[in-house]
Every structure is written in C-alpha cells, then in structure tokens.
C-alpha cells in the first residue's frame, strides 16, 4: 500500500490535514480587496495552506521566497522571472520595454528556464518598483494576480529602507492581492503591528497555530486503520510525541507506517521508530548543536529535559537578561517556539539532546 503521509515538501490533496477554518479565512481575504499576513513557526504549513487555496482560484499566482534573495536588484529579477512564467510574453513585452532600466532576459539551455538580470544602477529600487507596477498593470478587478512573499521579515536584511519603499508602491495597487508569510513572529509583528512601521495594519493578520489534536487524531487514525488494528493507539502515541506539530507529525507517521508494513505493532514500536529517526539525523543534530553557544546549549538542555518551563530554575545560575537574549536568539534561529510555553521546535532534536545528556553527559 502507498504510504499516506508526506513531509519535507508542500503538502496538498490527500496529504493535506484539515485547516478548514483557515482555508475559508484565506479564501475570503483573497476574494476581497485586502491583503493577507500569515505568521507561524517554520514547518507549520503556511505555504501548503496558501497553495491549497490558490490552486483552485484560477488566478495567476506569483510566489517568491525572500530567504533566497541577496539584494534589491536580485529581488526585482527573481520576481520578474516568476511574472514571465505565468504570463504570455506577447501580453507584457510592451510593458517591460517601458522599464527605466530594461532587463536582460534569456533562455537558460541547462535548465530550459528563463534567466533575468538588470544592469547595475545607483538607484536599485527603481527596477523593483517597475516590476511591481507591471504586476499591477496585468491585473483586473475580476481577475487579480496573487503575489506571495514568503519569509517576508527578510526585507530588513535586503535593504534597511525596503519596508518604507515597498509600502509606498504597494499601497497604490488596486488589482493585486499580496500575501505576506513569515516565521519570525516578533519581527513580523514589528512590521505589521507596530504603529511606527510603514506596513502597520496593511492587511488581515492570521496567526497559524498547531492543528487541533482531535482533527489530527482523526486524520491519522483513518490512514493507519488499513494497516493495523491498533490505529487509535498509534495515532495517540504519535501526537503525544510530536505535540501536534504538523511537519513532525507527518514525518513520524510516515516512518511508523513503513515500520508497520513489515512488523506488527507492539508496545515498543514508537520508541523503536523514534530512535531510528534520531540516529539517522545524528550528524545533522551534532552539527546544529555545535553552532550554539554555551548559554543556548543550557537553555536547550533545560527545555529538553523537563516537562515544564525550566527558565526560572535556569535564572538561578544565569542573569535573566542573558537567558532572554538566548531565548530570542533561539527563536530567531527556529530552534525553539513559543506556544503556551517555550519548547524545542523539533521533538526529535529534543530527544537527541535528552538522550545525549543522559547517556554521554554533554
């Protein structure tokens, strides 16, 4: 039987889990004249949610991950490349000819894709402004393109004035829906919730939470039922370990399914599978661990070993300011997330730390 679980890439169709309420909210915003902001930790399914909705909109979707952008000219080139991929050349070549700096567009024989570049200029933003205005000109009131800018908090690293420059252009657009995705909650809220920010209240803000346990349980149980009579127990054990984290739940379910293809369920199955996955990533986790400073390591150890927030205990041996600087750093790196309390984002990394701490006294 085909494994019914998927992780590591965009999840869609039969692999997509619930999010019915969020899907309706996204549809409502994209069918209006408003823009959308979605904030959640990495691997919570922001991109999958957006692609699930936009797939059936019959509108042009332009998606760009700003993590991969190096500067303003690169932003413009990569955005234009995606515009060209969803529009007919005959429709937009006249618009491009009026750019203040005309781009070089060529066909890459190695990838069979389009390459775009701009000549160096002292005013880098004009090239991005021209591309953004081109998108606006391709839109219509009844058929607006959707521009998805993922990891939007990265604009602060592209150019210190990017937020102000972008807002000055985007606020003029009437025929585009913009979607801003971000995984750094504090940085995204600084951009969209701080009254001093140019993007203050620029769109409808959604904070994507974990999938409710009952919904995730039903999703898992239904898919484990054909392969084991212990589908309820397996589903409960998976969710207890992952605490309903969308990515890691799918990952662990995938490995449990593969295990059950060859071995019947027993009381030690989950422990066996989790240990196998953790060992497979031992080198990766060791590399991550070695990037942390001493304070960050202490915080990760405390969060991995205790079932309650240990920050008060840690403050007895570390200044409070040092601890919260470490927490901020770990949040930005995505190693920890804040739900009801701070907790490691990756339950497998959490187990790796706990095991190493117990067995090897790291």
Image (cartoon, rainbow, N blue to C red):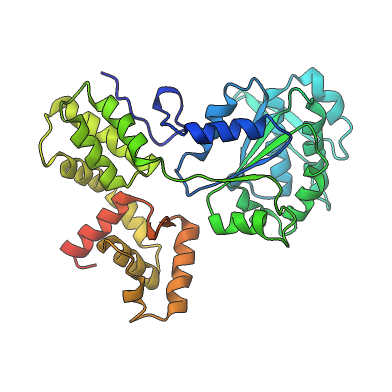
Q: Is residue 160 above or below residue 23?
A: below
Can I make out residue 48 in this image?
no
Q: Is residue 262 left or right of residue 296?
A: left
Tally of numbered discs: 0
Quadrant (top left/top right/bottom left/bottom right) for the C terminus: bottom left
Residue at image position (43%, 56%) is 337
Indicate left or right for 120 with 23 as reference: right
Q: Residue at x 32, y 47 (%)?
A: 243
Q: Residue 122: x percent and y percent?
A: 83, 53
Tell me, yes or no, if residue 7 can be seen here: yes
User: In the image, residue 83 lies at what x, y percent?
Assistant: 71, 29
**Vertical side of 82 occupied by 280: above or below:** below
Quarter of the rendering containing residue 157:
bottom right
Depth order, front residue of 337/354: 337
x, y percent for residue 320: 43, 78
User: Which residue is located at x 37 percent, y 31 percent?
Assistant: 6
**339 w.r.t. 323: above or below:** above
Residue 270 in which image quadrant? top left
Image quadrant containing the N terminus = top left
Query: Which residue is located at x 44 percent, y 62 percent?
Result: 330
In the image: residue 117, left or right of residue 8: right
- Where residue 89 sits: x, y (%)? 77, 20
Residue 226 placement, left or right of 287: left
- Which quadrant holds residue 260? top left
- Of 159 and 190, the residue lying toward us: 190
């Amino acid at each position: 039987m085909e494994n019914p679980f998927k992780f590591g890439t965009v999840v869609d169709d039969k692999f997509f889990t619930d999010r019915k309420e969020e899907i309706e909210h996204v549809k409502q915003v994209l069918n209006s004249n408003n823009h959308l902001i979605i904030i959640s930790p990495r691997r919570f399914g922001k991109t999958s949610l957006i692609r699930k909705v936009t797939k059936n909109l019959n509108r042009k979707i332009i998606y760009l991950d700003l993590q991969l952008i190096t500067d303003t000219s690169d932003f413009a080139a990569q955005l234009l490349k995606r515009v060209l991929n969803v529009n007919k050349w005959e429709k937009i070549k006249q618009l491009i000819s009026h750019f203040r700096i005309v781009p070089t567009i060529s066909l890459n024989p190695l990838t069979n894709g389009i390459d775009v570049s701009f000549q160096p200029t002292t005013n880098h933003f004009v090239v991005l402004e021209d591309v953004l205005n081109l998108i606006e000109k391709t839109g219509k009131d009844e058929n607006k393109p959707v521009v998805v800018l993922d990891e939007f908090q990265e604009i602060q690293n592209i150019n210190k004035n990017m937020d102000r420059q972008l807002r000055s252009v985007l606020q003029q657009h009437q025929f585009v829906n913009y979607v801003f995705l971000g995984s750094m909650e504090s940085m995204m809220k600084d951009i969209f919730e701080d009254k001093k920010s140019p993007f203050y209240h620029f769109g409808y803000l959604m904070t994507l939470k974990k999938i409710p346990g009952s919904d995730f349980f039903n999703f898992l149980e239904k898919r484990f039922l054909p392969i084991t009579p212990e589908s309820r127990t397996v589903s409960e054990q998976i969710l207890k370990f992952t605490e309903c984290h969308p990515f890691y739940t799918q990952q662990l379910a995938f490995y449990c399914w593969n295990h059950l293809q060859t071995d019947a369920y027993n009381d030690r199955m989950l422990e066996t599978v989790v240990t196998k996955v953790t060992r497979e990533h031992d080198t990766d986790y060791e590399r991550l661990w070695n990037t942390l400073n001493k304070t960050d390591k202490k915080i990760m150890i405390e969060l991995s070993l205790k079932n309650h927030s240990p920050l008060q205990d840690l403050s007895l041996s570390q200044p409070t300011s040092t601890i919260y600087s470490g927490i901020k750093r770990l949040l930005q790196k995505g190693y920890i997330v804040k739900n009801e309390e701070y907790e490691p984002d990756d339950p497998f990394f959490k187990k790796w730390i706990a095991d190493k701490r117990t067995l090897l006294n790291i």
